[in-house]
Image (spheres, rainbow, N blue to C red):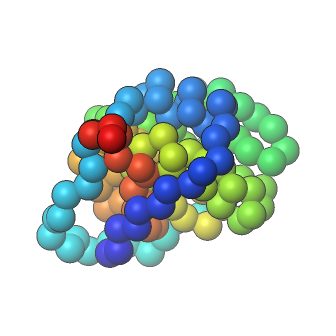
Amino acid sequence: MRLTHRKVATGAVGAAVTLLALAGCSSGGSAKAEAKVPATATGSLEELAADVDCKPNLQTDADEIRQAICDTDDGKYILLTFATDRGQREWLNTAEDYGGYFLVGRKWTVSVGKEKVVDALQGRLGGTIEVGASHASHQ
């Protein structure tokens, strides 16, 4: 597994509000033992939610993005699906500026505030973990 760290200069109020509402500032990633990661899941928002035993609370249902809040035994997180790969990458590039952890699959993303939650979800959905900007020490 490869953790990536990106800082992007652009901002978007919607992504910031959504992520900060759940995550707050993160303290940065820590090294962890490699775990066996399953093949990356595919499907609709509802199918992905079922894979993690989530009853999705749908917040956005638009052609280009669907977004739901999940609150499961693993923790609280945002599950998003995208119409295009480009739309997903643009959303991630902006959201990562606000910190947190992101589990990324093809045309879906899980936005999480806590590393242990993203680790648990990766064990069920596969995907790649990306780490947003750290806000632990503002210089």
Q: Residue at x 47, y 29 (%)?
A: 20
Q: Residue at x 56, y 45 (%)?
A: 95
What residue is shown at x 57% (from left), y 54% (from top)? 8
Asked whether the viewer can see residue 39, the reply is yes
Q: Quadrant of residue 106?
A: bottom right
Above-or-below relation of 12 to 29: above
The quadrant the N terminus occupies is: bottom left
57 shown above or below 42: above
Residue 54 at x, y = what percent? 46, 38
In the image, residue 77 sits, relative to residue 80, either above or below, namely above
Quadrant, the C terminus:
top left
Q: Say which residue appears at 27% left-offset and 40% top-offset.
A: 137
Query: Is residue 67 left or right of 55 when viewed as pictured?
Result: right
Q: How many marks?
A: 0
Q: Position of residue 127 (x, y in %)?
A: 45, 67
User: What is the residue that sits farthest to the right in this orientation?
Assistant: 63
| Horizontal and vertical percent position of residue 36 | 26, 74
**For residue 5, side relative to residue 136 (left or right):** right
Q: Nearer the viewer, residue 110 or 42?
A: 110
- Is residue 76 among the parts visible in the rendering? no
Q: Nearer the viewer, residue 136 or 39?
A: 136
Between 10 and 119, the one lying in front of the other is 10
x then y, percent, for residue 86 = 74, 63
Q: Residue 115 vs residue 87: left or right?
A: left
